[in-house]
Amino acid sequence: MLHVACGRRLLSFIMTTKTQHLHRIATIQGFGKKPRTLTTDDSPIRVEFAQHVDYLNHLNDKRERVVKASRDVTMNSKKVIFQVHRMSKENREETLAKAENDLAAVTNQYMSKLVKELHGTDFWKLRRSYTFAVQEYVEAATLFRFCKSGTLLNLAEINASLLPLTEESIEPLQINVLDYLLGLADLTGELMRLAIGRISDGEIEYAEKICQFVRDIYRELTLLVPIMDDNFEMKKKMETMLQSLVKIENACFSVHVRGSEYIPLLGSADPDYSFLGLADTE
Amino acid sequence: MRGAFRVVAPLFAASSAVSSRLSPALAPFLPRNPPSPLRRLFSALPPMSNHSPAATPPSAAVSLLESSSFEKQFDDFRVQLEESGNVRERIRAVVMELEAAVRLMHSSLLLVHHTAPNSEVLDKARAQIEVLKGVFHKLTDILRECPGQYYRYHGDWRSETQTSVSLIAFLHWLETGNLLVHAEAEKKLGLDNSEFGLDIEDYLIGLCFMSNELPRYVVNQVTAGNYDCPRKVLMFLTDLHAAFRMLNLRNDFLRKKFDGMKYDLRRVEEVYYDVKIRGLGPGDSIQEQNTQA
């Protein structure tokens, strides 16, 4: 539709500026040499291909802009994740408040740009260009929500938050279930890091909550992975996820087995020698 | 033997009794300073007690609600993905039919290499287009159920579509000597841009595949005595190649195929030259050139 209209306009353009056009082709193709052709400029083949030139230029330019917008989303989502990891027992509230602001900035500045570039079309066609950015964004948003309230941010909730970014007349970008699940798989890696970090900080219960959460996600995903489109990537992520889960479980196991010798040692400045097997009262 | 077992069994019972007594509900009531060997085991309990079902009721109720919405989301995903999986299965079944139809048409068209132009061969090949149209119609019907997802499943029919375009474009050239334009190709296959269209990149790649057939065709035609063919093919392919050079391509499959076209063009030029210098073509003979002089 678009390229037919462009083709008609271009046809009239070609008719009126034949010499300019010939010269342009000559310079592009042969550095001033006469182009190797046996027919004139307005041959049906040329006319036909003029449309396709426009179409391909338009498509590739759009793809490039989507890729550029995606890079911003990816980078800034990663920053949100790093901000969340800075959370500790003491500064929990401030850290999470800053993360919330940063995440809102990613949504309003960078995701909105991605949404505008896609302009309501080609969501599936250009998916490969923006899928990594969306996965990273899902990772950041779900990580923040878990740290804030211990729950999983639903796909419906994320998509609801994206709706205001698009004008009403245009079809909004909605994250599809595949990108959401891929992002969720990456989330478990970050949760593993979080859990190990919490254990070092002495927050054992928190680590165990993370453990149960990751277990639940892993369990649910095992049913979904076989029926996902092109699930090669997802299968690899599942292997990584199991490794992360095992790391968390082993860390919780160590804490559990070492019991009292472990807990006082962590998160407190008092020296404690109970791990040597000595009684407290001596 | 039985005696020993009976001695062992109570130990098990005792230890299981101990472990059941260690159930979280009772943990807070255990003495603070039990004998040291068991101390670590007991004091390990308080952290675990947070997991107990007997923990404070409000949070249990909340977590139950959360867990049900958690599970519901994944159940919904499972239904969604099963549906799209079914669509993909159906598409794949139709694409296999498409493959068969394309192979049949290709084999009909291969007959043009055997003889000089022959309308019977072309008619037989043209009849196959109706079959192709029928299969594409089936694909359109399936896609109608999930609008907007053409490109989600596009990979499944991409190569068959490209081959189809190359076959109908080649047939069109054999019949008319002209290039089959995109809009006409769409019409021939019964496709419609608003529903299930012909992707432009597929169309262009199809044209590149068509050009791959031309060198072989030209060689066989000359052998069969059709000496005017090289000139016609050369004109056509030169134009096509020049038109392709107007495009700005990325380094993808289309670019690779387009790069192959110049070798086809070279081979056709060589055949044309061979025919011309030997004066084999119509209007090329040395006698005619002498009379014109």
Image (cartoon, coloured by chain):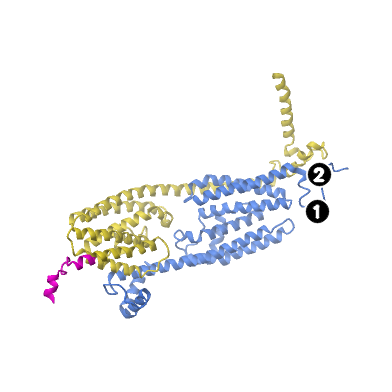
Q: Chain of mark 1?
A: A
Measuring from the top left, give residue A215's x and y in whole percent: 61, 45
Measuring from the top left, give residue B23's x and y in whole percent: 72, 37
Residue B283 seen in the current view? yes
Amino acid type, label 2: Ser
Residue at mark 1? A269
Chain A image colour: blue
Q: Chain of mark 2?
A: A
Q: Quadrant of residue B245?
A: bottom left
Residue at mark 2? A274
The dot on residue A130 is: none
Measuring from the top left, give residue B243's x and y in whole percent: 32, 69
Quadrant of image for the C terminus of chain A: top right
Q: Is residue B57 left or right of residue A175?
A: right
Residue nearer the viewer, B15 or B194:
B15
Q: Is residue A45 left or right of residue A111?
A: left
Q: Which residues are magenta?
A: B272-293
Amino acid type, label 1: Ala
Chain letter, colour yellow in render: B
Which of the marked residues, 1 or 2, is nearer the chain's N terminus?
1
Q: Is residue A28 left or right of residue B15?
A: left
